Amino acid sequence: MKVVGQCYCGQVSFEAEIQADKVRVCHCVDCQTLSGSAFRTNVPVAQGTFVLKSGEPKTFVKAGDSGNRLLHAFCPDCGTPIYSAVPGDPPSYSLRVGTLDRRAELLPARQIWCRSALPWTSDLNLPGAERLERQ
Amino acid sequence: MKVTGGCHCGHIAYEAEVDPAAVRVCHCADCQKLTGTAFRTNIASLPGTFRLLNGAPKIYLKTAESGNKRAHAFCPDCGTPIYAAAPEPNPTSYGLRVGGIDQRAQLGPPARQIWCRSALSWSMNISGVERAERG
């Protein structure tokens, strides 16, 4: 699936062909911290199809538990997370689903690192919780 | 409840008091983009209790549809979202990003969900999505 995406402030924009059947929810503690939320939602890019259209994301090198190095890119102006990439030629990109124009069409196929999942994330239809259509 | 929090790379650290039952999920399109995931998870610091212990977050001044402005703070080095607050020198309260709080597993479940009209449909219940305990 061809998608376009951009950060909140619009500085960074990109397009890519994604593997839409491989959307993943990641509950690892690093993804919780780096998203500021309960889990991250990622989708891998078909090799060689990521094109940065505008802007220059800032990159942060994250060393995984395994010792693997992963580049994490975010907008230096508004902080929107853009991608992670395994260095290589070409690099393997994974996009943050929240930034994609077609995010409403993407359904997760797999959840990983469930051992650190926040328990309430499984079902948000919580009895007694207030749900507002707007604010 | 006293909480501590910060960013992934360790540049930013803070402490605050929160009501652990006051977790809020925001499904608005802006929060989806700025977190890169399905929704944002926030908790308000109790008035006068937020204390920045280390680092200097970068501020992005965000203007809502209503015209209201909010200062969005994130780590300039690793991009971790830290808080949103009124754009003034000493805001009374800070909307802390739950993913960066060390005690996040003890917070919630969310008492309130807002902007449900733009929620990604799958995010309300992921209990049926294939689960792996690790990566």
Image: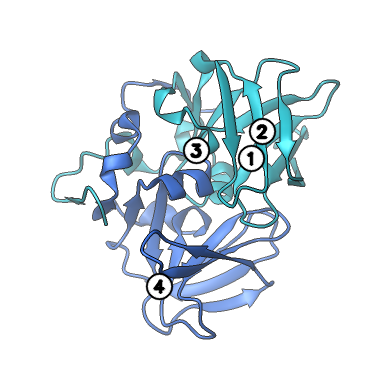
Chain colours: A cyan, B blue
Dot 2: element: strand
Same-chain check, marks 3 and 2: yes
Residue B119, x across and y down, in percent:
32, 39
Q: Amino acid at mark 3?
A: Gly
Apparent side of residue A45 relative to residue B5 in the rendered image (left or right):
right
Q: Residue at x 36, y 63 (%)?
A: B66
Residue A62, x across and y down, in percent:
74, 43
Same-chain check, marks 4 and 1: no
- The circle on residue A14 is 2
Q: Is residue B60 above or below residue B115?
A: below
- The circle on residue A98 is 3
Residue A21, x across and y down, in percent:
49, 14
Frontmost of labels 4 and 2 is 2
- The circle on residue B45 is 4
Residue A120, x across and y down, in percent:
31, 43
Mark 1 touching mark 2, by CB under 8 A? yes
Quarter holding the C terminus of chain A is bottom left
Q: Quadrant of residue B52?
A: bottom right
Nearer-N-terminus badge (1/3): 1
Number of residues whose C-alpha sits closer than 10 Å to that of mark 1, classed few (under 14), some (14–19) or many (20 or more) = many
Nearer-N-terminus badge (1/2): 2
Q: Residue at x 25, y 52 (%)?
A: A134
Q: Is residue A52 above or below residue B110?
A: above
Mark 3–mark 2 distance (CA, rounded to whole Å): 13 Å
Q: Amino acid at mark 2?
A: Phe
Frontmost of labels 4 and 1 is 1
Mark 4–mark 2 distance (CA, rounded to whole Å): 36 Å
Number of residues whose C-alpha sits closer than 10 Å to that of mark 3, classed few (under 14), some (14–19) or many (20 or more) = many
Residue identifier under label 1: A82
